[in-house]
Amino acid sequence: MTHFTNIIFFLGLSLLLVHELDAVKRHEWRIFPILSSLPEKTAYFIFVSLHLPLFTLILFYLTHPNPETRYWFIISMDIFFIVHMGLHGLYKNHKENDFENGFSKVIISLMAIVGGCHFLLIAIIP
């Protein structure tokens, strides 16, 4: 990957991390079936704690010594950035959805756009 495509990918990843910060503020665990049935403090603790292995796996695969493994991980992240927007669309009318403000929508939409652009740059137009 070139420096330009790296910057595009890391912009998408940064948008994901910013979205996760926003998700804590917006109590995203209230949308998830299992977490929403738990007491608020417990659901919050589990939601935030699950980000430790998630972020660890992201960092692990971004620094994986095998270039092919890194490539396919990055491709899968690009696809996730796009699918993630669709998931938020599915939960658009959920009573606990608090992502309907402009800032949250911009983060989610930009993540999908950046993921799509990056995917095109490295997978379709190499």
Image (tube, grey):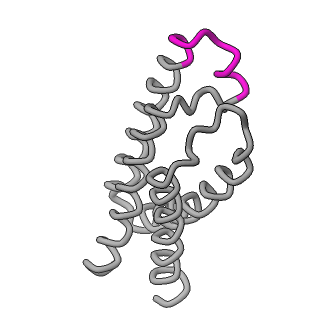
Q: Is residue 43 above or below residue 81?
A: above
Task: State which region is magenta.
Answer: 33-43
User: Residue at 53% across / 65% down in the picture?
Assistant: 112
Please state if 43 lies on the left or on the right of 93 as rendered.
Answer: left
Residue 8 at what x, y percent from top left? 35, 72
Residue 15 at what x, y percent from top left? 40, 56
The quarter in which the N terminus is drawn is bottom left
User: Residue at 47% across / 62% down in the picture?
Assistant: 111
Residue lying at the far left of the rendered structure: 3
104 and 64: which is toward the camera: 104
Q: Is residue 111 above or below residue 57?
A: below
53 and 11: which is toward the camera: 11
Please state if 125 lies on the left or on the right of 64 as rendered.
Answer: right
Which of the 4 quarters of the picture holds residue 66? Answer: bottom left
Please state if 69 lies on the left or on the right of 99 as rendered.
Answer: left
Residue 53 within the segment the image draws in magenta: no
